[in-house]
Image (spheres, helix red, strand yellow):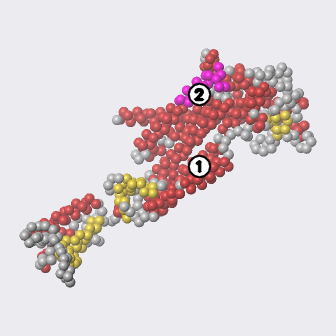
Amino acid sequence: MWVAVFRERRWSRRLTLVAVAFLLGCLQRSAGADESSLEMVPSDTSSPRATLQSFIEACNELHRVTQEDRFFDRTSSTHKPLARRILDCLDLSQFAEYEREEAGSEAAVCIKEILDRVAIPAWEEIPDKKQVEAAAGGPLRRWRIPGTRLTIARVEEGPQRHEYLFTSGTVGRAVQYYRDIASLPYRTSGPAVSQGFYVWYVSAPGHPVAAALVDALPHWATKRVLDQAVWKWLGLSIALLLALLALGACYRLHLRLVRQYRDRALLRYCLTIGLPILAALVPLALRNVAFDYLTLRGTWLSAVSFLSYLATLLASLVVVFALGNRIAAIIIASPQINPEGLDAQFIRIVTRLLSIVAGVIVFLEGGQYLGIPVTTLLASAGVGGLAVALAAQDTVKNLFGTIMLLSDKPFRVGERIVFGKYDGVVEDIGLRSTRIRLLTGHQATIPNDELARTDIENVGRRPHIRRIADIQIPLDTPQAKVQQAIKIVRAALEDHEGLHADFPPRVYFNEFQPTGFNIRLVYWYHPPRYWDFLAFSEKLNLAICRAFEEEGVPFSLPTRIRYTSPTGEERPLEMKLVDERKGEE
């Protein structure tokens, strides 16, 4: 057993160290990216001429550098500034935030391939900043490269306002434009060309180590299948398998540790949230591998990015709800709060509601990042909310019933209650219903709305158990014996077990019954422990029986009437109805 615990702790520590190392690596990578961004020189996009020159020069320089290095690393201090300068020349507003860099990169390469196949006008023929400002009717709004469908236009809104960029329409259709002219030869005059730029873009590895491995691969591994090199498909398959295994391991270990520590070790239970966080980072790691190292391109990269960010979004929702549970556990751990009380249940329900609100916010923000407009999300949420409200009226009523129960506090977990046909102990008060363990052992689930509208008898809160019993003695018993019987019962209850000073026992000859003289006894047992009460009642009954027997006081017995025939035989009584006026039966 101790060996298993030690191994589990060691395994948990290793996972924690791996998670910390991964996060530090991500932070370090981000810091490096920020430092390199400080060294970037933005492209000049003040006019169509400046934009076209900046774009062509940056593309040629990036092609030259990556050809020499034999790989394209977007995080490299050499490669990233050039790639950023290229993207500065494109209007990427039509793309979702998550895919702007990938889609923009492919569009830029295709635009460069088109420019390398058509005649570029002399630079002095392309409008510069002075010509743009001097244009009749105000600043020049757009300029199309002769012989192409490539357009550079002035941006009128957004963070790149008043810059001249390749239009969003040009960027969005650049891949198709390139495929239409891919068979044309490269031009031999004008600005320098970057031959094979697109082929290199879709085939180049993203890391020097990967480049060395690719160079060592057989020729078949560099062939293209579905627009990607074979080695990229192999690498993606391995990365995807590892990501799935990591996700499964994180969630499986998380569930196991939560069950182990939830009610035993609060600190360890809170620390288990690191596993869902790590699981949320796994899809991002897969996306980074596909983007930075495998350098997937085109539709496949967009698909991997979308699915990775979607998986991260869903995993983030798990983190939100897990965080809410741990916040509730920390608050309930306070000495002033009874873990089984209604206050604890109220805290749990409030944290669940707050988690739902936070989850909706995360979902809306994530949906916007994935390219779904906020208006669409809100409209969908409104229509969906109306549909859900209509379809879940009972759930809404139960929610308000829960609030009423928590505010009135008619019972709490562990108390025995009686209502309707149910009699049992409360096991859980949920957001929609309450679970009760009946005295038969069965579990009943009652909607909170029904409980809130029902008269509830809380047996668990009784301060004592009261017993009212009647003892009858025959009507022919002498008065002295009746008085003796009363004294016997009062003596048996004098200073009895479970006696409370404010509730002394009561014994009286209270009435005459057709079957005998009735002596009523009333007593209260403290504390209200039911099985102790039954044991005392049994002891009291035996003591009274013994005393009555010793004093010769009889108990009144039920009266029996036996009917017999004239011959003495016991049989049902025969009765005849006679009409006195006619003398007939």
Residue 242, given in percent of the width and then of the height, sits at 53, 30
Looking at the picture, does residue 442 appear above or below residue 237? below
- In the image, the segment drawn in magenta is 223-242
Q: Quadrant of the N terminus?
A: top left
Residue 413, given in percent of the width and then of the height, sits at 40, 56
Residue 141, given in percent of the width and then of the height, sits at 85, 40
Task: Inspect the image, locate mark 1, and give the three-letter code of the amino acid beneath it.
Answer: Val
Residue found 62% across the figure and 37% down from its top: 306
Per the picture, the main secondary structure of the magenta-coloured stretch is helix
240 falls in the magenta region = yes
Name the foreground residue: 12 vs 110. Answer: 110
Residue found 62% across the figure and 53% down from its top: 382
Q: What is the crowding at mark 1: few (fewer than 14 residues within 10 Å), some, or many (at least 20)?
A: some
Task: Inspect the image, locate mark 2, and give the three-letter code of the amino acid beneath it.
Answer: Leu
Q: Is label 2 in contact with label 1 (beta carbons under 8 Å)?
A: no
Name the foreground residue: 332 vs 248. Answer: 248
Looking at the picture, does residue 307 appear above or below residue 399? above
Residue 236's tag is: 2
Residue 114, given in percent of the width and then of the height, sits at 79, 27
**Residue holding disc 1:** 360
Name the residue furthest left.
Answer: 567
482 falls in the magenta region = no
As helix, strand or loop, the secondary structure at mark 1 comes to: helix
Looking at the picture, does residue 473 appear above or below residue 81? below
* Residue 281, picture quadrant: top right
Q: Quadrant of the C terminus?
A: bottom left
